[in-house]
Amino acid sequence: MRILVTGGAGYLGSILVRRLLDGGHQVRVLDKLLFGNDSLVGLEGTWGFQLYHGDVTNVKDVTAAMNDIDAVIDLAAIVGDPACKINEDLTIQTNYWATHLLAEVAQAKGISKFLFASTCSVYGKSSGSADEDGETNPLSLYAKTKLDSEGVIKKFSNGMGGRVLRLATLCGPSYRMRFDLVLNIMTAKACIDGKVQVFGGEQIRPLLDVRDAAKAFQYLLENSDSSDYYVFNIGSNSSNTSIANLGELVVNTVGNSELTHIPEVSDARSYRVDFSRIKDIGFTPDYSLEDSIHGIVELFKDGTITDYTNPRYHNAKQDYQN
């Protein structure tokens, strides 16, 4: 299959692209390369791999990248609440209008599959276990743009096989590492500083290793042929955990670190998610939270990463205008 992956040089994309190539697919990446192309090192010259340095908000770039393509996986976005607050107009343009452009061009070109990366943050704050047919309550611009984009995919999905993947909070090692994610930053602080801070602690979040997120996209691409529109929560029911429990898990797994609880809560999101739908069609994650922690620890042990505070590992520290 010939697949376009937007944002293919990113935290999730750089793993997914390799999975797809290993699976025998041809992969074209459309990416602005805001964080550089180090995450794709080793792929140049690989059979089936193409890199288009371009912008998902640019009509010419999108149209050219979508020539001779069978499926689109749309990962490109300004990701995370803090990063989205920097320039809200640019966030809306990148996260919403670019999705509209991609879906419109894909439909016009007769592309049969379109997979879109959304987020479980669309549930915001809920008391029960949120499923795909229940109420949404986005609390941030990031979540709102993702939910609005889901509507775009549904609108253009007639005959295009639209799939929305609402991802749990991602974690774990990647070729383009991030340390602005809760488990990742806790692990980094435990490894380097010997201290982990938990703000609040009662908030519930589902977590998912980024390698399993990549697996989910490949699974739905290869095992879901209906032309109808579907939404899937991506994760596992066992991964719903409190931030306090997460902090304890990190400290116990890494060792030689201490846990500090801070009452103030800067992030009000708290939601438990039901992942039965994706499980019912045969998908299960491979990595535990301990696996994710160990994977990050290895990045420090082998010297791949030395300074987790480097702006390149934090989405909110980037200049998205360039």
Image (cartoon, grey):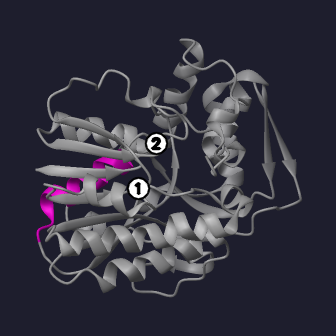
Residue at 56%, 80% (x, y): give it.
128
Under circle 1, the secondary element is: loop
Please state which amino acid type lies under the numbered disc 1. Leu
Q: Residue furthest front?
A: 60
Residue closer to the observer: 316 or 67: 67
In reply to whether residue 151 is colored magenta, the answer given is: no
Q: Is residue 176 above or below residue 85?
A: above
Kindly indicate whether the residue at mark 2 contacts the one at mark 1 (C-beta within 8 angstroms): yes
Magenta-colored segment: predominant secondary structure: helix
Of labels 1 and 2, earlier in sequence is 2
Q: How many marks?
A: 2
Q: Which residue is mark 2?
A: 10
Please state which amino acid type lies under the numbered disc 2. Gly
Residue at 54%, 41% (x, y): give it.
34
Residue 141 horizontal/vertical position (percent):
65, 72
Residue at 85%, 48% (x, y): give it.
261
Question: In the rendered view, does 221 fall on the left or right side of 238?
Answer: left
Q: Is residue 256 visible?
A: no
Looking at the rendered structure, which numbered label has been put on residue 75?
Answer: 1
Give the magenta-colored segment's residue range: 212-225
Residue closer to the observer: 224 or 57: 57
Q: Is residue 69 above or below residue 294?
A: below
Q: Mark 1 Cα within 10 Å, few/some/many (few <14, many 20+)?
A: many
Residue closer to the observer: 120 or 241: 120
Residue 51 horizontal/vertical position (percent):
31, 38
In reply to whether residue 224 is colored magenta, the answer given is: yes
Residue 9 horizontal/vertical position (percent):
42, 39
Question: In the rendered view, does 202 fall on the left or right side of 73?
Answer: right
Question: In the rendered view, does 81 fall on the left or right side of 18?
Answer: right
